[in-house]
Amino acid sequence: MMLDRQKIASSRRWVIKVGSSLVTAKGQGLDHVAIADWCAQIAQLRKSGKQIVLVSSGAVAEGMARLGMKKRPSVIHELQAAAAVGQMGLVRSYEDEFKKHGLHAAQILLTHDDVSNRGRYLNARGTFNTLLELGVVPVVNENDTVATDEIRLGDNDTLGALTVNLIQGDLLVILTDQDGLFDADPRNNPDAKLISEADLSDTRLVGMAGDSKGELGRGGMRTKLSAAYTAARSGAATVIAHGRKPDALLQIARGENIGTLLKPAEAPMASRKRWIAGQLQLRGKLWLDEGAVKVLREQGKSLLPVGVKKLEGEFERGDLVACVDPDGREIARGLANYAFADARKIIGAKSDELEARLGYVGDVELIHRDNLVIS
Ligand SMILES: Nc1ncnc2c1ncn2[C@@H]1O[C@H](COP(=O)(O)OP(=O)(O)O)[C@@H](O)[C@H]1O
Ligand SMILES: N[C@@H](CCC(=O)OP(=O)(O)O)C(=O)O
């Protein structure tokens, strides 16, 4: 048990989600003291080498406070208007606090389309990766201005989990107004006991998480549990903890026994690769030379344009394509970094020739090894 806590403590990429109930002080607008505290902890985590993405709710709640709305509006455009007003305060507060620690913050607003459309998915991932390499803390929320029912992600627990999938995070931390997942909803069961650790394959979990929630929250514990399942699809563990416990994030980073740890059943890369292979339809075929077949098979490397001789299929950037050997036998499949039209310009080219052929600086790999599954 300690071993699992130690493992997540030393993991590198974290997505931390804070809920409305925490960010806003009982509907009185933003809780700047709490925000300052998380930002200070995140600054320490960054110093210790972790890459952090923050998913923060609170736009609607802060907008309501600013506009003097007493009740959460039920008209969708009023909710969206409140979110647009509140988001200003939210990012301003994070920016101010991170600045005190010499950190830059970046605003990222996402909708369902951004994570389901493969091209946009890759673009968003590239932006996240670059921000993280630059040492910036991305602050994510749902793009409430354009998100209505069909394109809504639903809630920020889900958004946190999808962000974990997107950036291949190691850990999802959900900070909320309870100590973690209890064996029954503690709002109605004073005897409910905290689960300190569970395997996501444990079928009893679903029965424990209720959908009752705080006045400002949306999903209750049920969406937090389902977020943990989604995060586990790309191999990440989830910790649900109380956001007002002193040093909650630092305690997790020290491997201490705080909140509820929900463990994925499978090793991270195995689940990511199954996810790639299982989710998408084949859209094209890349004919490899012998050298490329060898490095893919024997060395687990990325596929570079230089090793590809011929292309088939009108695939887009991010589509699943098959890699075949000179006899046409499939040896691997993966997500292409280039659409057919651009891929055609660079096959057979060495890495230092790509820019001249494309007219822009793109990815060095045609398929990155993290997105490649050997058949
Ligand atoms: N088994 C459970 N363990 C803990 N909390 C639960 C459970 N079932 C339901 N809940 C409720 O979930 C609430 C947290 O969800 P929510 O209000 O949506 O928070 P947030 O704003 O942080 O997303 C808790 O306050 C609690 O009442
Ligand atoms: N985009 C919305 C998210 C609301 C939401 O999911 O809230 P919560 O259940 O508290 O995480 C906002 O910022 O108000």
Image: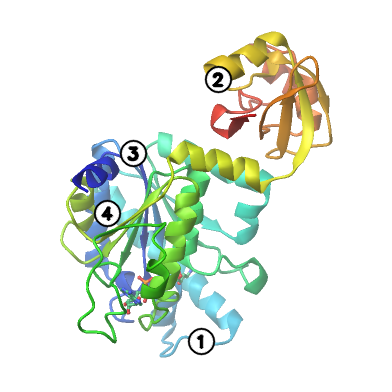
Tell me which numbered mark, 3 or 1, is placed earlier along the sequence: 3
Q: Earlier in the sequence, mark 2 or mark 4?
A: 4
Within 10 angstroms of label 4, few (less than 14), some, or many (20 or more) residues? many
* Residue 173 higher or lower than 120, as above or below: below
Residue ID for mark 3: 12
Of the two numbered discs 3 and 1 in the rendering, the one whose residue sits closer to the viewer: 3
Q: CA–CA distance between discs 3 and 1?
A: 39 Å
Q: Secondary structure at mark 3?
A: loop
Q: Can residue 107 be seen?
A: no
In front here: 80 or 21?
21
The amino acid type found where label 1 is placed reads Pro
Residue lying furthest front: 203
Instruction: Examine the image and state in which quarter residue 178 appears.
Output: bottom left
Crowd around label 3: few <14 · some 14–19 · many ≥20 (10 Å): some
Q: Residue at x 53, y 58 (%)?
A: 109
Counting from the top left corner in percent of width and height, residue 323 is at 72, 25
Quadrant of the frame with the C terminus = top right
Give the quarter of the image for residue 301: top right
| Numbered label attached to residue 39 | 4
Q: Is mark 2 within 8 Å of ligand 2?
A: no
Would you name the residue on which mark 1 appears? 73
Badge 2 vs badge 3, beta-carbon distance below 8 Å? no
**On the image, numbered disc 2 is attached to which residue?**
301
For the residues labelled 4 and 3, the Cα–Cα distance comes to 17 Å
Residue in front for this viewpoint, 298 or 129:
298
